[in-house]
Image (spheres, grey):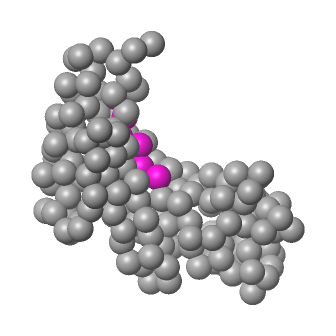
């Protein structure tokens, strides 16, 4: 089904609001692409740089945020990665980690509807922080699991330490 003029107009308004507000939440360098309704930027974490791709989806009235990891799970570690990500996802309030079994690609994903919503600085700040903090919190532990620096059992022990 084709995107209507009304849907595209609303998506462009959301795009403009996000572009205008990102500097106010600390994101000074970003790459807005109006044609694709996409905004990309990076955030420096404790262990790895984190890339974020924000896409405005007119038909679904969503802001879709993706953060691909800088590594893929090795073939022999994909099952461990799936188990670790399932444990993490069960505990998350917003967003989830996805793993592509065909190539080990991992990314964090969060979607938020903009239906009837005004994009505010507080909403953008929340989306930036929850995404960056979630990715930063787990990226090194998942990297270590993938490289064999830690075992699945050690990961799960660390993960459940505060239960």
Q: How many numbered circles are shown? A: 0
Q: Nearer the viewer, residue 13 or 120?
A: 13
Q: Residue furthest bottom?
A: 149
The quarter holding residue 30 reads: bottom left
Query: Who's the residue at 69% across and 81% down the image?
Result: 144
**Does residue 53 appear anywhere in the picture?**
yes
Query: Who's the residue at 57% across and 57% down the image?
Result: 107
**Does residue 92 appear anywhere in the picture?**
no
In the image, 3: left or right of 91?
left
Q: Quadrant of the N terminus?
A: top left
Query: Who's the residue at 38% across and 78% down the image?
Result: 44
Q: Is 104 situated above or below 153?
A: above
**Residue 7 rendering spot, x and y as whole percentages:** 27, 21
**Residue 8 rendering spot, x and y as whole percentages:** 26, 24
The quarter holding residue 4 reads: top left
Query: Who's the residue at 53% across and 60% down the image?
Result: 68
Main secondary structure of the magenta stretch: strand
Q: Residue furthest right?
A: 76
Q: Is 73 situated above or below 35?
A: below
Q: Quadrant of the C terminus?
A: bottom right
**Residue 98 rendering spot, x and y as whole percentages:** 62, 52
- Magenta run includes residue 163: no
In the image, 150: left or right of 7?
right
- Magenta run includes residue 65: yes
Q: Is 63 situated above or below 29?
A: above
**Residue 10 rendering spot, x and y as whole percentages:** 21, 27
Magenta span covers which residues? Answer: 61-66
């Amino acid at each position: 089904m084709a995107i209507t003029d009304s849907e595209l107009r609303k998506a462009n308004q959301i795009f403009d609001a996000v572009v205008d507000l990102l500097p106010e939440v600390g994101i000074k360098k970003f790459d807005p692409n109006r044609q694709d309704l996409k905004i990309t930027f990076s955030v420096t974490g404790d262990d790895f740089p984190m890339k974020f791709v924000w896409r405005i989806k007119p038909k679904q009235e969503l802001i879709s945020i993706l953060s691909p990891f800088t590594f893929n799970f090795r073939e022999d570690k994909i099952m461990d990665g799936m188990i670790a990500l399932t444990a993490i996802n069960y505990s998350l309030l917003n967003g989830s980690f996805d793993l592509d079994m065909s190539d080990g690609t991992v990314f964090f994903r969060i979607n938020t509807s903009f239906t009837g919503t005004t994009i505010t600085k507080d909403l953008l700040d929340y989306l930036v922080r929850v995404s960056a903090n979630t990715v930063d919190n787990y990226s090194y532990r998942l990297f270590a699991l993938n490289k064999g620096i830690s075992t699945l059992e050690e990961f799960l022990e660390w993960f459940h330490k505060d239960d």
